[in-house]
Each structure stands twice: as structure tokens, then as C-alpha cells.
Image: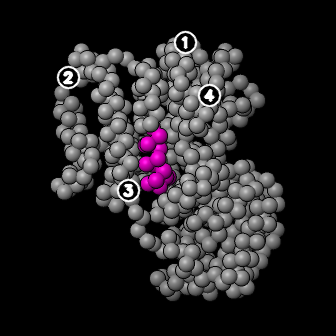
Amino acid sequence: MSQQRGVESSPPSFSQLEPGSFRDPDSRVFYAEDGVLRVLSERGRADWEAFAASSLFSEATAEGKLVATETADSVIDQLPHVLHREVAAVLRHEVIPFVSYPYEWPFGMLKDAALLQLELLRRALSEELILKDSSPYNVQWRGSQPVFIDIGSFERLRPGEAWSAYRQFCMLFLYPLMLQAYKNVPFQPWLRGKVDGLEPAECAAVMSIRDRFRRGVLTHVVLHARLDRRHTESDRDVRGELRKAGFRKELIEANVRGLEKTVRRLQWDPPASVWTEYGTTTTYSDADAERKEQIVRAAVESRRWRLVWDLGANDGRYSRIAAANADHVVAADGDAAVVEALYRTLKQESEKRVLPLVFDVTDPSPGLGWRGAERQTLADRGTPDLTLCLALIHHVSISGNVPVADFLDWLRGLDTSLVIEFPTREDPMVRRLLARKREDAHPDYNRGWFEQALGERFNVERSEELSSGTRVIYVAQPGT
């Protein structure tokens, strides 16, 4: 729930509806000047009151695991009636710094989000409450700290009913984690390709006979896929049958405890790559590295920044520098192993200003879901007022085949201040990249054209060539 959207002085309007909140008939989310608002139906209000009266609500909020929430019924008459039933209550939530999606998270973030979801569900059951949804989209981040945001998911536990969100948990949490842990298959493309996650049959098809002996696979994948197929082909009212049979809460609790054990034991050891070893293989001299850091630090300290993007963040060295003078930093890199290592470090540091994301500049997150708006592009969730592009453009232009001017056009469209580094064609890394191409490839990748294109789009305040003579750093403001 980003600060950058829906800020108006007038009463909330339809244009400020959160496009991804339409799935719950008892709850819709709006953006307003003073925060994030949620409208509730009469049923939703009753569930909210039961949750608000529980010890879980106050305790989890104090622990930072639950988004801060208060009633805001004074604005109830200003909101449109989008529930097709009477709006019975309005809630106001704290604003999460920057919205991210599970296909932008490394393995450790998805795992910690799953464990948070299961912990809250287990604690809710002890107070006769349950989570009707089990989606990673209900978890956001304060830096490296996961926070559950969908207050409308908590409802009163109804006797005899099973945990209806178990299938959703498997499809969006458990199966992606198993793919990465057991098969070393990145889950991000799978989640990005389908907003509802992996079907049981799809996950079962990936697992080998030997995989069936791994923890959780037989129960939660193979048997689940068989039952799923039977229920799909049948007209039986399984939910009603379970209710009549007196389905017990203890069965749900046992399932949740088993899932927690399974998820905790899932591990992924990122393979070594060029980027995980970048800090030890970089061609920078000590003098160049120190001067580069000084330039970045001076730019960052020139003012207080609301949101900084560090594109190609690698180990987060410059993200940390930016965080010292910024409210929030998005540290993005296209290598999931690098982002996993960064997340683990930030988690140990309890860092709440730097959000690590898996993000490929040459293949950015698109709009997904219903009408392409249910999940939004990175820029639609909030643009930065400072962007760091350090040791990046040669990979975008040469490896990614994106014309230099096109990349600068994209940056200019963000309306952002900019610190950008240009390695010349003589730079050892650039020479290595060009050696893989035809001799006449990438004629637009040269310092003269880069400086002309940059000057046409930005006001360049300063530029400095590092002592190596093959890298130049520019500090620029968006042009008028």
C-alpha cells in the first residue's frame, strides 16, 4: 500500500480504489490523503470486532507483525458503496512504504512470509478465529520485516468448517518454495506467470518419484493433486459434508503445525555466480572504489530523500549509504542469489529502510491479473525521487540489447534525480561483454553519445572520471 498513490484533498473516489481488493465481497480498500481505508460489510464488521477484541490483534500489532489499524467510521458517508450491500464500518491502516509482490522476492522472503502467515493462523485458532485467505499478497515489508496487511482476512471460526485457504497456501507459498528448495527451479517466473499460483497437479508433475520421499511432498503435493482432481470431476459438496461430519478445529491446528515444520525445513543454498562473487572479482582499484563511494554519499547527503531506487544493488553497499539519508530504499537486482544474500544480511541487521527485490531492468514486472491492474508495475506503485544506476548501463545496453537512449528515456520517465555510472568501451568488463558480440555491435554504446543523450533528458550537475580512466559518474536532475 504505497504512499505515492491516491493522494487527494477531496473525499475518496472510485479512482482511488485498490484494484487488487475486489476478490473479497465483504471488504474493499481505498487510498486517501491520510492513509489506507478499508470498507466492511455487516459481516465483515462483525468479524473485525471479534478480531479487534482478541489478544492476537494487540499483541501482533505491537510486535510489528500486523499492520496498525483503527476504526474510521467518521468518513463512512463519504465513501462510495462498492460492496453492493450496506457499508457497516470503515478502517484506517498505516501506510506501507512500498508495495512488492512475491515474484519479486527471493526464497528467504517468501519463506518468512509463509511462516508469518502460519503463525498468525495458529494464534488466531486459539482465539476461535481463522484466516479465510492464505495469499503472499497479504504480506508486505518494512525493509526486511514482514507485516501482514489484510485485516479483512480474519474471521470468526465457524464450527465444523475446514480451513478453506489450505489449497491457496499450497499454491502460492508451499509449492513455489518446494520448487526452489527441492528442484533448484526459480519460483519467480511461475508466480509471475499466474497470479493464483501453481496447481497441485502442476507441482506434482515437476516432482520425481524420489522427490515423493521428501518432507511434505506426498501429503501436500501428490495426494493433494489426486484429491483435487477427484473434487474437480465431482459435484459433491465437500465443504458441506465436512460440516455435517463435525470437522474439528484440532485437525486444522495439526495441519498448520505440520506445515510450519515443513516450511522451516525447506532450505535453498544459492549457487555461486558472477554477481555473488562480484565484490571479490570487481576491477575497481581501491582508490576508484573509495572515490565512487564519496560521490554517491555526497549526492545522497544533498537533501532528504523520500524514496530511493538502487538498481543493480548487488550486496547493497550503496543502498545502505542511501538509507542513511532516505526514508526508504528499494534495492533491486536481477540475480535472485544476490538478493537472497542481501536479504539474509538485512534481516540479521533488522534493517527496516532497505527493501531487497529481485528485479530485472530489462524485463520488469508487468501489470498482471484482472485488466492488468490487479498487480501493478514497479513504477505504478511509486516512483523514486533518487535513482542509483551504478555499474549497470553496460549490462542493460550490451547484455540486454537495450539502446542507450531508450534506457535513459525510461529513467527520465520516472522524473527522478540520478546518479549514473558509465563504463567506457575500454573498461575490462565492457570489453568482456563486447567480446561476445559482433565487432560492429552496439555503436551507440560510447561516451560521447551517452553524454549527449543524458544531457538531452537531464540537467547534469557534475561528472567525474575515476582515476582508472574507464569509468565516469554523473549526477543529474530531471530536465525541464
**Residue 267 bears which disc, if any?**
3
**Residue 86 bears which disc, if any?**
1
**Residue 236 bears which disc, if any?**
2
Q: How many tags in the picture?
A: 4
Q: Are marks 1 and 4 in contact (CB under 8 Å)?
A: no
Taking the magenta stretch, the answer to whether it contains residue 114 is: yes
The quadrant in which residue 15 appears is top right
Magenta highlight range = 104-117
The quadrant in which residue 32 appears is top right
- Disc 2 to disc 3, how far (Cα)? 38 Å
- Please report whichever mark, 1 or 2, sits nearer to the chain's N-terminal start: 1
- Residue 24 in sight: no
Residue 475, compared with residue 353, is above or below; it is below
- Disc 3 to disc 1, how far (Cα)? 47 Å
Q: Amino acid at mark 2?
A: Arg
- Please report whichever mark, 4 or 2, sits nearer to the chain's N-terminal start: 4
- Please report whichever mark, 1 or 4, sits nearer to the chain's N-terminal start: 4
Secondary structure of the residue carrying numbered label 2:
loop
Q: Amino acid at mark 1?
A: Glu
Q: Nearer the viewer, residue 416 or 57?
A: 57
- Disc 1 to disc 4, how far (Cα)? 21 Å
Which residue is drawn at the image coordinates 66% and 75% (left, top)? 422
Q: Amino acid at mark 3?
A: Gln
